[in-house]
Image (cartoon, rainbow, N blue to C red):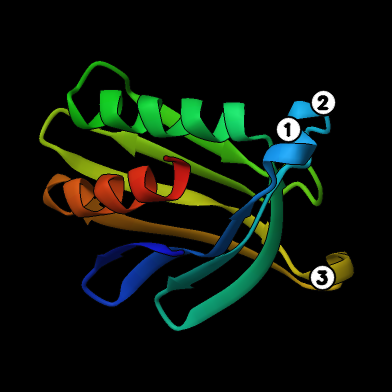
Amino acid sequence: MNATLTYLDDSLAILGFAYSPEDAESGNPYNCSFSLRIVSGEFSGLAPCEYDIKAFRQFVLELEELYQFKRNTVELSDICCGSKVVFSIDKTGHITVNGNTYGEGLAHSLEFEFLVDQTVLPTFLRELHLLIR
């Protein structure tokens, strides 16, 4: 399953989301995996990510709070390779998406930043909820 945030020519996509309930139940924090694809201007990158489902669900809740202006920033940080995405909202509803992603074996990296309008978040949030149900 996938979730994509797109605004103009920039995008952030969570691709191939997979969750292992067995790993979560056994206490393994590496119980989710997905690829994070970033397109920012003329640059793009694909990063493998691993996550704990509890932390990923918390990220989704915090992103909803950001959309409702109850939070200024939200961070998604991979627990394996260190890729990080930060969402920051201003008072007018414009959201800055920035961070760093690292490719397989940390051989490549992408530092990125782009702006999105708050109106694109509801679709992204719906797709994220489908991933974590």
* Figure check: 100 above or below 122: below
- The outermost residue toward the top is 70
* Viewer-side residue, 102 vs 128: 128
**Residue at 61% of width from left, 35% of height from top?**
53
Among the 4 quarters of the image, the one containing residue 70: top left
Q: Which mark is residue 24?
A: 1
Q: CA distance from mark 3 to mark 1?
A: 24 Å
Task: Check disc 2 and report the residue beneath it.
Answer: 27
Q: Determine crowd level at label 3: few under 14, some 14-19, many 20+ residues with C-alpha closer than 10 A.
A: few
Q: Which residue is mark 3?
A: 104
Vertical arrangement, residue 65 with respect to residue 124, above or below: above
User: Comparing marks 3 and 1, which lies closer to the viewer?
Assistant: 1
Q: Is residue 54 above or below residue 78?
A: above
- Marks 1/2 in contact by CB < 8 Å: the verdict is yes
Q: Secondary structure at mark 1?
A: helix
Query: Mark 1 belongs to which amino acid?
Result: Ala
* Crowd rating for badge 2 (residues with CA inside 10 Å; few <14, some 14–19, many 20+): few
Residue at (73, 42) in percent of width and height: 31
Residue 132 in the image: x percent, y percent? 46, 41
Indicate which disc, 3 or 2, sits on the residue closer to the N terminus.
2
Question: Which of the 4 image quadrants contains residue 28?
Answer: top right
Question: Vertical placement of 103 versus 100: above or below?
Answer: below
The type of residue carrying mark 2 is Gly
Where disc 3 sits, the SS reads helix
Q: Looking at the picture, how far across and down is residue 29, in whole percent?
A: 78, 33
Gap between marks 1 and 2, in whole Å? 5 Å
User: Is residue 99 toward the left or the right of residue 11 in the image?
Assistant: right
Name the front one of labels 3 and 2.
2
In contact (CB < 8 Å): disc 3 and disc 2: no
Q: Is residue 120 left or right of residue 12?
A: left
Q: Residues within 10 Å of mark 1 (few under 14, many from 20)?
A: some
